[in-house]
Image: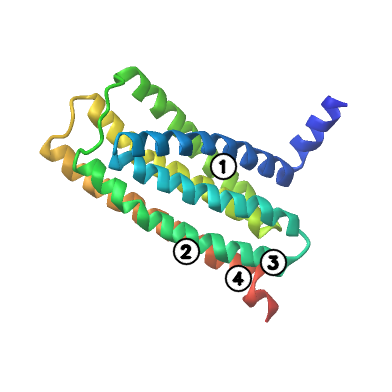
Amino acid sequence: MIKELFLRIKNNYNKKTVIFAFLSVLALIGFTVYNGIFGFLYNSIWHICIFAYYVFLLLIKGILIFGISYKKIRDKQLLVVYITFIILILMTIAMIAPAVLLILDKRSYNWGLIPSIALASYTTYSVTMSIINMRKAKNNDSPVIKQIRLVNIVNTLMSVLVLQNTLILANGGYTEDMRKLSVATSVGIISLIIFIEIYQFVLTIKKHGVYKKR
C-alpha cells in the first residue's frame, strides 16, 4: 500500500510539487523562527532582514498551497497568481536591504571554509533542480504549479547572493575588488529575479488569463 502510494505520488507531477512545497514550508518555519529569535535577541539587522524575507516566502507558499484546492477553477487560480506575484515583487525589492548589508560587510561569519563549501554544493544543486523543475512545469495546465516552481527559482537565486557573501567572508573578507564584484553581482541577480518574475507572470496571463479568453 505504501509502495502504491509512493508510485502514485511519483507519477503525479502536481501532487509531487505540492508535497515538496509543503515540506519546504515546514523547513522555512524553522529558518524563520531561528532568524527571528536571533535577530531580535541580539539586535542583528541582518537576521531581522532575513526573518522578514522568510515571512514573505512563507506567506507566498502558504497562499500557493491553499490555491491548489482551486485546481478546477481557473479564475481563482489566477487570483492566487496575481496576489503572489505582487508579494514576490515586494519581497524581491525588500531584499535590496540585506544585499546592501552584505556589501557593507555587516554580516558576521565564523563557521570556517568547510560549511561554506557544503553550502555552495547545496546551492548549486538547488539552482539546477529549480531550473529543471521550472522547465517541466512549462506546459503544465495549472498556473499555481508554475508559480510554485517560480518561487523556488527566486529563492535559490537569493541563496546565491548569500553564498557569494559567505565564500568571500570565509576566504578573508572583502577587498575593494571583491566589494565591486559583489555590487555588480547583487544588482545583476536582483534584476534577473525581477525580470523572471515579470516574464513568467506575463506568460501565465497569456496562457491562462485574459488573452486566452479573447
Instruction: List the residue tagged with mark 1.
Output: 132
Quadrant of the frame with the C terminus? bottom right
**Numbered badge on residue 206:** 4
Secondary structure of the residue carrying numbered label 4 = helix
Report the label total: 4
Residue lying furthest front: 41
Q: Secondary structure at mark 1?
A: helix
Q: Is residue 214 above or below residue 35?
A: below
Circle 2: residue type: Ile
Q: Position of residue 168 (x, y in %)?
A: 24, 31
Q: Which mark is residue 76?
A: 3
Disc 2 and disc 1 in contact, CB within 8 angstroms:
no
Q: Amino acid at mark 1?
A: Ile
Mark drawn on residue 198: 2
Of residues 156 and 125, the one drawn nearer to the viewer in this rendering: 156
Residue at 47% across, 39% down: 32
Alpha carbons under labels 4 and 2: distance apart:
12 Å
Residue reaching furthest left? 176
Quarter the N terminus occupies: top right
Tag 3: amino acid: Lys
Which residue is painted at 70% across and 40% down in the image? 16
Query: How dense is the environment of label 4, judged by Cα within 10 Å: few (below 14), some, or many (20 and up)?
Result: few
Whole-angstrom CA distance, mark 1 to mark 3, is: 27 Å
Confirm or deny contact between disc 2 and disc 3 (CB under 8 A).
no
Q: CA distance from mark 2 to mark 1?
A: 19 Å
- The answer to which of 8 and 64 lies nearer the viewer is 64
Image coords of residue 159 (percent x, y): 40, 39
Q: What sort of colour scheme is used for the picture?
A: rainbow
